[in-house]
Amino acid sequence: MTQAIPAPPRFRHRTLTEYAVILVVIALVLTSVANTAPSLDKLERGVARLFAPSGFLMQMFPPDFSRVEHIAWKLVETLQMAVAGAALGLIFAVPFAILATDRLSPHPAVKIVARGLIAFFRTVPDLVWAIFFIIVVGLGPAAGVLALMIDKIGFAGRFFAEAMEEADTGPQDALRAIGASRMGIIFSAVFPACLPSFTATSLFALEKSVRGSAALGLVGAGGIGVDLKVAFDLFNYDEALTIILMMLVLVVAVEQASSWIRAKLI
């Protein structure tokens, strides 16, 4: 008669310290929701105001398509900003990521500085970068492109560095043993191994740029955001809805194209 094999435990046993950390996290989540989430009473009154006959949502319908040609051209400018900012950011993210990788950085101090810059670029919101570059180069899409570039250096630099950290070290050690240079190892062993991850990160960065570029115009950094802000300021909510709908079409189109490219290349 065979002895029944007991089922493995659903959860592994944890130490008291781990249970304490879990309790602290749960307490933080609960207190955060309690202190910041809107009350059901306020939420109910707000929703009622939105759907009132003279409410905000009712003023947005039907959408106003009288300036659809102008909006379409501003969307083209928004897409150009996104592509330019993402391309420049991805190009500059590669050397930052190399310098931030343990096995590829020339010195530990250089690695610390590179990681710090990547974290700094990623921490500051792109709207803040847009305001900074508006001061530097003035109003217009150039400030938006520079803001997106810095944001993408922080976004892609982190994932590029992680991909290079996780790459198989066998080919790198073999090339290093026969006297290959640092750049030779990077281009012959590291980049080929990381290409699928680089491709996915680059396409996600482009999607993120398209969504971000639409918002940068709210502070004067070019793109469709300028028209959206003007429409809200002048209470032209029907035109604002048209802009939002066309922005949605652009974002969905870019995401679908990105998914198709990712499926073909990876």
Image (cartoon, rainbow, N blue to C red):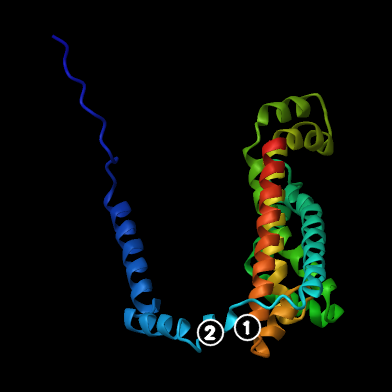
Q: In which image quadrant can residue 214 be found?
A: bottom right
- Asked whether the beta carbons under mark 2 and mark 1 sit within 8 Å of each other, the answer is yes
* Quarter of the image that includes the N terminus: top left
- Residue that numbered label 2 is attached to: 56
State which quadrant residue 121 falls in: bottom right
Image height of 141 relative to 154, above or below: below
Q: Residue lying at the far top in this picture: please name it.
A: 1
Is residue 189 or residue 142 the one in the foreground?
142
Which three-letter amino acid code belongs to the residue tagged 2?
Phe
Residue 210, which numbered label?
A: none
Q: CA distance from mark 2 to mark 1?
A: 8 Å
Q: Percent position (x, y) of residue 119?
A: 64, 62
Q: SS class of the residue under badge 1?
A: helix
In the image, residue 201 lies at what x, y percent?
A: 68, 48
Q: Is residue 177 above or below residue 2?
A: below
* Residue 66: quadrant of the picture: bottom right
Pointer 1: residues within 10 angstroms few (<14), some, or many (20+)? many
User: Can residue 117 be seen from the camera position used here?
Assistant: no
**Which residue is located at x 36 percent, y 81 percent?**
44
Disc 2 element: helix
Q: Which quadrant of the rendered structure holds the C terminus?
A: top right
Q: Residues within 10 Å of mark 2 (few under 14, many from 20)?
A: some
Q: Amino acid at mark 1?
A: Tyr
Residue 106 seen in this snapshot = yes
Q: Residue at x 82, y 58 (%)?
A: 88
N-terminal of the two: label 2 or label 1? 2
Q: In this figure, which residue is indicated by the disc labeled 1?
A: 237
Where 262 sits versus 75, above or below? above
Q: Position of residue 219 (x, y in %)?
A: 72, 81
Q: Which residue in the rendered view is the most extreme toward the left?
A: 1
